[in-house]
Image (cartoon, rainbow, N blue to C red):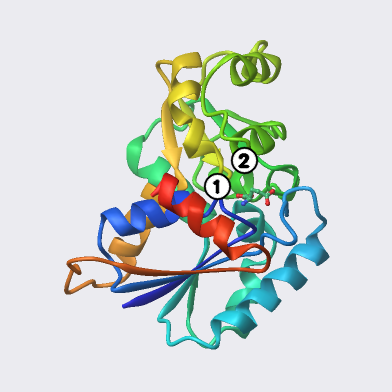
């Protein structure tokens, strides 16, 4: 099986990492729209347009599935992608919600959704969670986390201050959905802040989802990954070396 992984930039590497660790695919084609990142502050129509352009790129490859690792794309463009794609499409929102559902039967469990403005404004996580009966949901867009992660500040004073800024008047939730590709990279620090909360990571969730939906007869010895970017692919490859 071959997969295309699409993200607005480098953040989708957090999903590639999980796919690679579980050896689900013989090959992954990664495309990061680095020239136009961030998507999380853009409106629905722009995100749909960019996503359909990325789909055209992936049509040049012999892939079985395209995974929209970007939560903002999953929030706004998943139906449009499904309608136009000649291969299977997976986002990360449904997998994330199913991963949470598999972890608890308690519909009153308190859930904190963290995402970009686009993801939070779309209400996709919240709607799906409510469809499964969860009713104790808080949504938050800690937008400054994205540039902080891009800057490589995965721990330390800056991150701590910003976390305090966003979290200080919240009660510790039972679950936190890391609804943005960048947030798994600061998961350790988020767990320090909320030590009893269970974190839901898009990468792990999508692996669980794909394994339940498709029959993977073989796990491959290793996954070959090709990296493409709309701007500065060398920088993306460099980041991939560090993150993966
Ligand atoms: N990849 C985006 C997401 O998961 C975060 C970065 C951006 O805003 O483009 O929503």
Left/right placement of residue 215 relative to residue 78 reads: left
Q: Earlier in the sequence, mark 1 or mark 2?
A: 2
- Cα separation, mark 1 vs mark 2, equals 11 Å
Residue 155 percent location from the top left of the image: 51, 22
Residue depth check, mark 1 versus mark 2: number of the one nearer the observer: 2
Label 2 secondary element: helix
Whether residue 55 is situated above or below residue 70 in the rendered picture: below
Whether residue 190 is situated above or below residue 227 in the rendered picture: above
Position of the N terminus, as image quadrant, is bottom left
**Residue at coordinates 62% horizontally, 75% vertically from top-left?**
81
Q: Is residue 69 visible?
A: no
Whether residue 225 is situated above or below residue 43 in the rendered picture: below
Label 1 secondary element: loop
Residue 168's quadrant in the figure?
Answer: top right
**Residue at coordinates 81% horizontally, 54% vertically from top-left?**
42
Q: Residues within 10 Å of mark 2 (few under 14, many from 20)?
A: some
Residue 106 percent location from the top left of the image: 40, 30
**Residue at coordinates 46% horizontally, 53% vertically from top-left?**
240
Residue 66 percent location from the top left of the image: 49, 73
Residue 32's quadrant in the figure?
Answer: bottom right
Q: Please give the residue where the numbered disc 1 appears in the rendered image.
A: 181
Residue 47 percent location from the top left of the image: 75, 63
In front: 159, or 109? Answer: 159
Whether residue 209 is situated above or below residue 120 in the rendered picture: below
Q: Is residue 17 visible?
A: yes
Question: Cβ(mark 1) to ligand 1 < 8 Å?
Answer: yes
Residues at discs 1 and 2 in contact (Cβ within 8 Å): no
Q: Please give the residue where the numbered disc 2 appears in the rendered image.
A: 150
Residue 80's quadrant in the figure?
Answer: bottom right
């Amino acid at each position: 099986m071959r997969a295309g992984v699409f993200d607005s930039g480098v953040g989708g590497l957090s999903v590639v990492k999980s796919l690679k660790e579980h050896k689900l695919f013989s090959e992954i084609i990664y495309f990061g729209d680095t020239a136009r990142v961030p998507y999380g502050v853009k409106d629905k129509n722009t995100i749909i347009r960019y996503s359909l352009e990325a789909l055209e790129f992936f049509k040049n490859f012999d892939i079985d599935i395209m995974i929209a690792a970007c939560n903002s794309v999953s929030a706004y463009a998943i139906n449009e992608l499904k309608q136009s794609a000649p291969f299977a499409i997976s986002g990360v929102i449904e997998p994330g919600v199913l991963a949470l559902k598999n972890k608890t039967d308690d519909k009153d469990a308190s859930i904190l959704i963290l995402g970009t403005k686009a993801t939070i404004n779309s209400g996709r996580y919240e709607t799906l969670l409510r469809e499964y009966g969860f009713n104790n949901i808080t949504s938050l867009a800690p937008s400054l986390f994205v540039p902080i992660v891009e800057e490589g500040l995965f721990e330390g004073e800056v991150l701590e201050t910003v976390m305090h800024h966003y979290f200080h008047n919240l009660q510790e939730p039972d679950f936190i959905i890391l609804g943005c590709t960048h947030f798994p990279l600061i998961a350790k620090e988020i767990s320090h802040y909320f030590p009893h909360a269970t974190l839901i990571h898009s990468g792990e969730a999508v692996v669980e989802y794909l394994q339940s939906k498709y029959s993977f007869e073989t796990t491959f010895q290793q996954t070959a990954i090709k990296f493409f970017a709309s701007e500065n692919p060398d920088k993306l490859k460099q980041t991939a070396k560090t993150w993966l």
